[in-house]
Amino acid sequence: MNPTNIQLIRGFKDILPGETELWQHIERTAITLFEDFGYREIRIPIMEKTELFARSIGEDTDIVEKEMYTFADRGGDLLTLRPEATACICRSYIQHKMAAQDPVRKFYTIGPMFRRERPQKGRYRQFYQIDAEIFGIAAPFADIELIFLLRTLFDRLNVTDTTAHVNSLGCPVCRPRFKAALAQILDQAAPHLCADCLRRKDRNPLRVLDCKVPGCRKAMAGAPSILDYLCDDCRTHFSTVTDTLAKLGVPFEIDKQLVRGLDYYTRTAFEIQTGALGAQSAVAGGGRYDGLIESLGGPAMPAIGFAVGFDRLAEIVAATAPLATRPPALFIAALGDTARRQAFEWSTALGVAGIGVSMLYEDRSLKAQMKQANRLNAGQVLIVGESELAAGQVVLRDMASKTQREIPVTALVKTLIEIFSPAPV
Ligand code: ATP
Ligand code: MG
């Protein structure tokens, strides 16, 4: 019988050793930056009640309409694998009554999201996001800080080919006037719109502006700019954002077509685009959602956040700066049973002391073991045979200089620790 190999789910992927070093590097860079700016990590569950996403993201969005992994569990509860983190963080903020202690909170979270989209390069069904949110601040400085943080993160990762696209989506005061103006254009454009946009036209008209189908883009090219319809407060807010970004030297473009796909966004919307990615040019997106927390049953609370597409970012960073894996500082080549037992004991003690050690656990020739040490690129090799043990001296060979010396077996671990991590002078 030839059992068929089980493959992973379409649109899902493994991140293998060799890649994970890069993912960890990106993660550490992001975490350091967030912590320096006073953000605290929050970890939310991977599944929530479907209603949370339906209510927050909005029924008429791509995500809720066609991308969510939703199922009834054995108890009949309707659950969804999270397609994004913002709704979950809002749910947590409300549930733990965080506003009562201190409404101003800065969060970050890093983890997998799930959307059943058509898989292609840069687009997966399980993908990862690096997410940051600021709750409780209505002032434009929160918006600026987040865009600035993204720029700094990309700088630190040597990703320089990025531009922030920014727009304002107005607020419940001024958006209705824009929607009315848009409705007229939409009626004229209708014969040229794609099927999705014909549906959006009545239910979620702003999203027609954001459609990537060339026919729709062309039909909407003459659409009015929402920026011409902003109320005074929204206009002041937006100009503070753009003026300050310019002062901080953050490259940005005002993009009146930019409409985030989620219903709850108000005022500033932004997307970080890069030329390094081909078709999937958005490496991060975000915006303000001042109405969301209240609409989910929480207090009226301004908020803003972003999500970086981790997979896309990793792809760019991998292309610019391949990361080397850390080779072991020491390889122990042991010959014979007794020597191997002794070597294994030493290797655990050295590992505990933070010295990278590797050895083979099975009986192999010295030649095979030296080959392995070379393959791993080990700095030094300790050669332990029965005769060396009997003589109380083992051999330490430096692989780069090809020199070797003898080390007494007594207090060997202590000696090696001194060799590999010399005391600071
Ligand atoms: P897109 O226009 O590419 O579909 P989006 O507007 O759906 O993006 P957001 O919900 O704003 O994306 O998510 C923020 C970021 O997450 C995106 O800019 C992108 O980098 C990344 N992202 C979104 N969907 C996927 C996916 N299916 N696979 C990989 N990364 C994704
Ligand atoms: Mg999408």
Image: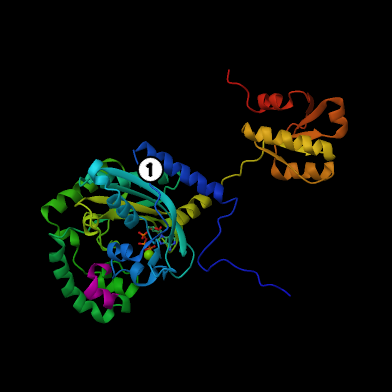
Magenta-colored segment: predominant secondary structure: helix
Q: Residue at x 14, y 65 (%)?
A: 176
- Residue farthest front in this picture: 75
Position of residue 219 measured from the top left corner of the image (x, y, whole percent) = 26, 74
Q: Report how many numbered discs are placed on residues in the image.
A: 1
Q: Is residue 201 magenta?
A: yes
Q: Is residue 118 visible?
A: yes
Q: Which residues are magenta?
A: 197-207
235 vs 354, nearest the viewer: 354
Q: Is residue 165 visible?
A: no
- Residue farthest bottom in this picture: 191
Position of residue 36 measured from the top left corner of the image (x, y, whole percent) = 37, 36
Is 377 on the left-hand or right-hand side of 324?
right
Q: Is residue 251 magenta?
A: no
Q: Residue at x 60, y 51 (%)?
A: 17
SS assignment at label 1: helix
Q: Residue at x 27, y 52 (%)?
A: 94
Position of residue 189 measured from the top left corner of the image (x, y, whole percent) = 23, 77
Q: Quadrant of the N terminus?
A: bottom right
| Displayed quadrant of residue 75 | bottom left
| Displayed quadrant of residue 54 | bottom left
Q: Is mark 1 within 8 Å of ligand 1?
A: no
| Displayed quadrant of residue 67 | bottom left
83 vs 34, nearest the viewer: 83
- Residue farthest top in this picture: 425
Quarter holding ligand 2: bottom left
Q: Which residue is mark 1?
A: 152
Give the class, few, some or many, for how many residues have Cα within 10 Å of label 1's Cα (few <14, many ≥20): some
Residue type highlighted by circle 1: Thr
Q: Residue at x 35, y 44 (%)?
A: 149
